[in-house]
Amino acid sequence: MSAPGLPLLMTMVSVLALWALLTTLGLGLLLVVKPLESIRVHLERIAMGVRAIERETAPIADLGGRLPAATATLRDALEPLARKLRGFDATLARARTTARAPRRE
């Protein structure tokens, strides 16, 4: 039927095959871990940069909310000046047409 040492031999070969499989899996995982750690470091740097940008640009949102009211206040404050400048412009236009008109003697 079977040789007396055959089950022992098969067990030893199976153990060696299992050991080889586990060693190969372990080495493969080590080869994958190193690039993943490098990627993690780069992603941490990117995340740190994004947080810094977010922190630096946070006041812009507040300013954006206050901008319509500030522009309305500015428009109201500059309206008297604009009226005076329009009047000055009309006066200059009249003076220009008067200066160009031929003089009658």
Image (cartoon, rainbow, N blue to C red):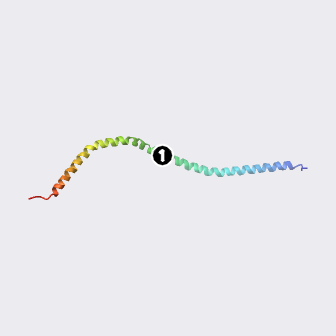
Q: Is residue 9 left or right of residue 98?
A: right
Q: Nearer the viewer, residue 101 or 2?
A: 101
Q: Is residue 25 left or right of residue 38?
A: right
The quadrant holding residue 103 is: bottom left
How many numbered marks, from 0 up?
A: 1
Residue at horizontal 49 percent and vertical 47 percent from the top: 50
Q: Position of residue 56 (x, y in %)?
A: 44, 45
Crowd tier of the residue under label 1, counting other residues whose Cα lies within 10 Å: few below 14, some 14–19, many 20 or above: few
Q: Is residue 15 left or right of residue 44?
A: right
Q: Position of residue 15 (x, y in %)?
A: 79, 48
Q: Nearer the viewer, residue 73 or 4?
A: 73
Residue at horizontal 24 percent and vertical 48 percent from the top: 86
Residue at horizontal 70 percent and vertical 50 percent from the top: 25
Q: Amino acid at mark 1?
A: Ala
**Residue lying farthest to the right in this orientation:** 1
Residue at horizontal 47 percent and vertical 46 percent from the top: 53
Q: Nearer the viewer, residue 19 or 104?
A: 104
Q: Is residue 37 left or right of residue 103?
A: right
Q: Secondary structure at mark 1?
A: helix
Q: Position of residue 72 (x, y in %)?
A: 33, 42
What residue does disc 1 label? 52
**Residue lying farthest to the left in this orientation:** 105
Location of the C terminus by quadrant is bottom left
Q: Position of residue 32 (x, y in %)?
A: 64, 51
